Amino acid sequence: MIKLYNTLTRKKEEFIPLNKGKVNFYLCGPTVYDSAHLGHGRSAVSFDIIRKYLLYRKFDVTFVSNYTDVDDKMIKRAEEKGISVAELSEEVIPKYVEDYAELKIMPPDHTPRATDYIEEIIKLIQKLEEKEAIYELEDGIYFDIKRFPEYGKLSNQKLSDLQMGARVQVNKKKKNPQDFALWKKEKPGEPSWDSPWGKGRPGWHIECSAMSSSILGETFDIHGGGADLMFPHHECEIAQSEKAHSKPFANYWLHNGFININEEKMSKSLGNFITLRDVLDKYSGDIIRYLYLQTHYRSPINFTNDLLEQSKNSIIRLHDFVNSIKRINNEGNTHKEVVGFIEEAEKKFEKSMDDDFETPEALAAIFEFVKELNVFAKENRLTVGDKKVILDFLKKIDFVFGILLPKKQELPKDLMKLIKEREEARASKDWAKSDEIRDMLKEKGVILEDSPGVTVWKLND
């Protein structure tokens, strides 16, 4: 039984999808005005893990993550660059695809763009108009939050408190300070589309409601996103969607924690903004993914260079272990003890992940498994039978984690020949030649590690 923390109810709940065995899942994707940053990566990896664990548990998952390709930020950045908003999105989206691929994020089943759903957005606003939940001002069409008394239920805020605590209104003609734009009327130089209310473009919140309901239905299972989207974005999505359709919008709301840089929330205004590409140029995607995994998805991460280095060392340790298992050549059947280690590790992994996707505890179970097997390995007790079941288990777990299995490393034939010559020298106890070849390989960046019955090589990072 999977339990997850539902932001809407503020408690852990048993996950029961609308349709048995089927999960409809929507994740708020990025506004593509600039390159992906560490916060984007944190959200993408967190929900990639959740999605893959649901698949691991044999659910049929339809996963949707959008691109917001028209909004105020897009328009401003395109103007700065002297290109159209459409050209900007075509420039930025491939960068997201590339960065996410390096983090081993599975591509969504659907990646809708807001500009492809203008017709659906207009129809949704018309439904709200029929229910007298909108009003028109000079600059656009607004949602009247008083028409949805439950506004604030996701972020656990009362409407009266929201009104008292509101800052100076951008548009003083609004009925309520928290009323939000559904349709923004055309301004010179901005993208626009025809609508019953004149030419214009959609507001941010209505885009996600229209895209998610069009693909997944008016009610679906899981809606995810960063904690910064809880209010007002997700709150507004709920209000307009549930007012329009008179039914629940999403049954489970999941939010990942912030990225802090040296104890401060990452933001451009503080000057501590770090892009994924900045880090990927220095560290592998496995290392960054591990950095995210070692903290529970709902908790904040305090990003530091030391944390990156720790993640790097942990990945090296895991990959060295896997490479040593791959090179086992002792004939023999699978040991019962090894099967027992696997069963125990799998049990702990699943128990941790079933509990709101506790990746730190699940990782600890894998490291404990590695520690136990290393005892066997040092005694030269592991066999080719053991190798198969161990690698099969790690492959199964790594479908979720995406960090355990290293990229296949190959050496040029001349270096492999040297390794073979050294093995022959060791077999004949020609230690001088063996040491000479070891030193030659080290100069070429190849490190050899000897253990009874097997020599493991790895590249020196």
Image (tube, rainbow, N blue to C red):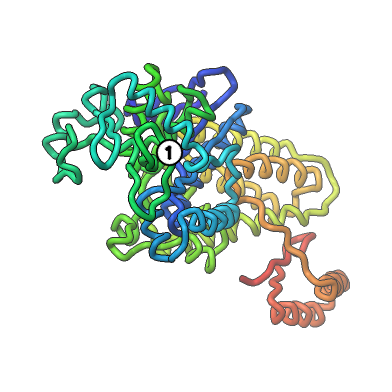
Q: Is residue 460 above or below residue 228?
A: below
In the image, 44: left or right of 442? left
Image coordinates for residue 225, horizontal then vertical, percent: 42, 40
Residue 398, image quadrant: top right
Tell me, yes or no, if residue 224 can be seen here: yes
Image coordinates for residue 156, horizontal then vertical, percent: 25, 30
Which residue is identified by label 1? 194
* Residue pictured at 65% horizontal, 48% vertical: 373
Q: Is residue 347 above or below residue 439?
A: above
Q: Nearer the viewer, residue 265 or 211?
A: 211
Please name the amino acid that badge 1 sits on.
Answer: Asp
* Residue pictured at 75% horizontal, 49% vertical: 382
Q: Is residue 155 above or below residue 324?
A: above
Image coordinates for residue 10, horizontal then vertical, percent: 32, 28
Residue 206, image quadrant: top left
Label 1 residue SS: loop
Q: Counting other residues with Cα less than 10 Å from the Cα at mark 1, is it few (<14), some (14-19), or many (20 or more)?
A: few
